[in-house]
Image (cartoon, helix red, strand yellow):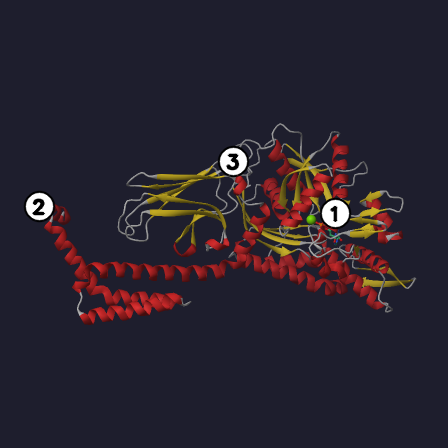
């Protein structure tokens, strides 16, 4: 879709009349399913009251597949038949995975370069899509059990950093599990939704989400129920799993021997994770690992844990700093920090987040559930509407190309729709009789870094001097996200319009990437924009002077002429260069050199204009001028 729509109550509900839809947090470590009714979301539980389904799948020897806690049981006896953290492999090709192979105790099926990665489990070969589909199927069944009716639609959350391939893989997995994905929602956004709606909070918030396999931080503005994402950042390969690895390595290093086997690593990771979770509430304890068939005991206390996890936690804090910087915000500009994800239960994480953001973080919604609850709210909004205010906004800015490949934004991103905005443009050259309207979408300053949506020509502009024509370009986005662009020359009324259909639009994953890039490049872009503007200004000055010389060169003496020519040559040289200040100085110098000439041209112009007027008219005009 070109423009994402979330406007319960105002836009027609895109999925109204269908059966209900659930919200799913498909986590690296744990997954949940939730439902919202009348704006009140709740997680769905099994008959034993459990809401989290560990994202673990066991392909058992007898051919049966176990998911969640049942699969976890298999982990101890037959760890090689159990797959965890599959989300890290979603959408990954065999080439990407070589880098991760060390941190993933799975056997990878040999695959050609460019192929989707596959895992070998006993005599089976499975893809991450199939494995994730098992989890989604389990979630669907849990939902159906709890609701007593069939579940076929869902809003599924994904990390903000998921790329095209990973998002597509997630959708494919859902389809395989019998679920239609109404929308993929970024996890931090879902969390903010849950918080914002529960509390009616206003202001700018940071969402710090540290799960098992991913870290996301987003800066969101909640204002009158409208969500605006100001900046996002994170690390797709940083989370509680890495905490477990750091602790497991510490344990394994304490009982030296040959390189540990895959099963020994899994065993050590299991203990490491228990140790970590225990130490969130206890000060110390002792855990077991196995080396060469022998068990050994390893004590661990909070201080040692903090030392092991410190570098990983600091990486998240550094990313928080970068994201705030991208959003041009200081910590004091924030109204709060939201904690999401199981790993935010680690006391060191809470302490460092509180220190960095200079306030205690919000954590009153269960950090495990908050994402699923937000997804459920979104699912309800898409199927039945709700009173909760979630306005439709344009997800990316819409604009047109102007001189020098710059983008003039006409509708900035996060503008509530429907909306119509117009702006006037003019011609660049004397006698220019056509204008190309190039419609682009994106946040970057230069056309070639944004997405091109449409291009059309407005012809038949009456020849006029440069800058005299008035072309009004209007952008209108209707409630369904359909963009219409029209251009109208004001004196003749000549008009051209084009409809930009959603199919020409941007897949959400491109959008995410483009947003991220725009944040990252904002500073370079500004410098480039200033340089380009200076060049355009310089070219314009040269062009204007050329025209003037062609018409009125007889008004110049030979020495005046040569001074101007020197200034022209200097400006010509500097517009080729990269130095904006140099260009601006050259423009000023040329202006100076032409001052007398310009004055003389004006006098000359007035004199020749007067010749064609009756005395009567001149007197009237002069009287008006005095009055
Ligand atoms: P994901 O979103 O990646 O599925 P979760 O938000 O469910 O992850 O978080 C899972 C991570 O949280 C795991 O690494 C788990 O060990 C960790 N975790 C859960 N409970 C605790 C706890 N009490 N203390 C420390 N870490 C915890
Ligand atoms: Mg999560």
The furthest residue to the top? 17
CB at mark 1 closer than 8 A to ligand 1? yes
Count the marks: how many?
3
Q: In this view, does 539 lie to the left or right of 285?
A: left
Image x and y of residue 389, in percent: 55, 37
Mark 1 crowdedness (10 Å alpha carbons): few <14, some 14-19, many ≥20:
many
For the residues carrying marks 2 and 3, which lies nearer the camera in this image? 2
Q: Residue 614 carries which label?
A: 2
The answer to whether residue 612 is seen in the rendering is yes
Residue 480, which numbered label?
3
Q: Which residue is drawn at the image coordinates 84% and 47% (left, top)?
A: 59
Is the CB of the residue bearing disc 2 within 8 angstroms of ligand 2?
A: no
User: Dot 1: what SS?
Assistant: strand
- Considering only vertical position in the picture, is 51 above or below 331? above
* Residue situated in front as seen by the camera: 356 or 472: 472
Q: Is residue 623 above or below residue 517?
A: above
Q: Position of residue 321 (x, y in %)?
A: 58, 60
Q: Nearer the viewer, residue 380 or 19?
A: 19
Seen at 70% across and 54% down, the residue is 93
Residue drawn at (50%, 35%) of the image: 479
The mark lying in front, picked from 2 and 1, is 2
Q: Earlier in the sequence, mark 3 or mark 1?
A: 1
The label on residue 30 is 1
Mark 2 touching mark 3, by CB under 8 A?
Answer: no
């Amino acid at each position: 879709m070109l423009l994402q729509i979330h406007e319960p109550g105002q836009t027609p509900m895109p999925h109204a009349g269908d059966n209900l839809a659930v919200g799913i947090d498909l986590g690296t470590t744990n997954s949940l399913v939730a439902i919202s009714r009348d704006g009140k979301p709740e997680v769905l539980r099994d008959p034993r009251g459990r809401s989290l389904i560990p994202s673990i799948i066991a392909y058992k020897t007898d051919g049966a597949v176990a998911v969640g806690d049942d699969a976890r049981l298999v982990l101890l006896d037959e760890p090689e038949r159990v797959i965890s953290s599959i989300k890290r492999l979603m959408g990954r090709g065999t080439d990407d995975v070589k880098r991760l192979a060390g941190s993933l105790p799975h056997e990878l099926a040999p695959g050609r370069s460019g192929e989707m990665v596959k895992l070998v489990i006993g005599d089976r070969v499975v893809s991450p899509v199939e494995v994730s589909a098992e989890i989604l199927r389990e979630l669907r069944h849990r939902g159906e059990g709890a609701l007593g009716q069939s579940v076929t639609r869902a809003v599924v959350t994904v990390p903000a950093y998921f790329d095209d391939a990973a998002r597509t893989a997630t959708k494919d997995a859902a389809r395989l599990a019998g679920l239609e994905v109404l929308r993929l929602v970024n996890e931090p956004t879902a969390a903010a939704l849950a918080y914002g709606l529960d509390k009616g909070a206003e202001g700018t918030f940071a969402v710090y989400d540290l799960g098992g396999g991913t870290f996301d931080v987003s800066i969101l503005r909640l204002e009158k129920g409208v969500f605006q994402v100001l900046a996002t950042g994170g690390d797709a390969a940083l989370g509680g799993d890495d905490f477990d690895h750091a602790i497991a390595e510490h344990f394994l290093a304490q009982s030296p021997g040959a390189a540990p086997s895959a099963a020994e690593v899994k065993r050590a990771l299991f203990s490491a994770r228990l140790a970590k979770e225990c130490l969130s509430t206890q000060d110390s304890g002792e855990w077991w690992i196995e080396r060469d068939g022998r068990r050994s005991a390893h004590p661990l206390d909070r201080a040692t844990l903090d030392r092991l996890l410190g570098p990983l936690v600091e990486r998240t804090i550094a990313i928080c700093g970068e994201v705030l910087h991208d959003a041009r915000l200081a910590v004091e500009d924030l109204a709060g920090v939201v904690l999401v994800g199981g790993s935010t239960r680690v006391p060191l994480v809470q302490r460092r987040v509180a220190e960095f953001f200079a306030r205690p973080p919000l954590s009153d919604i269960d950090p495990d559930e908050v994402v699923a609850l937000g997804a459920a709210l979104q699912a309800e909004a898409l199927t039945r509407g709700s009173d909760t205010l979630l306005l439709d906004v344009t997800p990316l800015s819409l604009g047109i190309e102007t001189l020098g490949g710059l983008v003039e934004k006409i509708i900035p991103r996060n503008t509530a729709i429907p909306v119509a905005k117009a702006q006037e443009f003019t011609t660049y050259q004397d006698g220019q009789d056509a204008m190309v309207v190039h419609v682009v979408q994106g946040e970057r300053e230069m056309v070639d870094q944004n997405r091109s949506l449409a291009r059309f020509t407005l012809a038949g502009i009456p020849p006029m001097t440069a800058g005299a024509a008035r072309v009004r370009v209007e952008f209108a986005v209707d409630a369904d996200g359909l963009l219409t662009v029209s251009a109208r020359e004001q004196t003749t009324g000549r008009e051209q319009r084009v409809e930009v259909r959603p199919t020409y639009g941007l897949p959400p994953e491109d959008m995410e990437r483009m947003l991220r890039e725009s944040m990252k490049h904002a500073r370079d872009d500004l410098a480039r924009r200033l340089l380009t503007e200076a060049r355009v200004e310089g070219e314009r000055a040269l062009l204007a002077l050329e025209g003037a010389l062609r018409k009125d060169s007889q008004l110049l003496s030979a020495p005046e002429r040569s001074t101007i020519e020197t200034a022209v040559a200097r400006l010509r040289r500097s517009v080729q260069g990269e130095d904006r200040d140099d260009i601006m100085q050259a423009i000023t110098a040329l202006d100076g050199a032409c001052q007398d000439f310009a004055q003389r041209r004006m006098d000359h112009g007035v004199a020749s204009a007067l010749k064609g007027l009756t005395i009567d008219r001149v007197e009237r005009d002069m009287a008006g001028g005095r009055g």
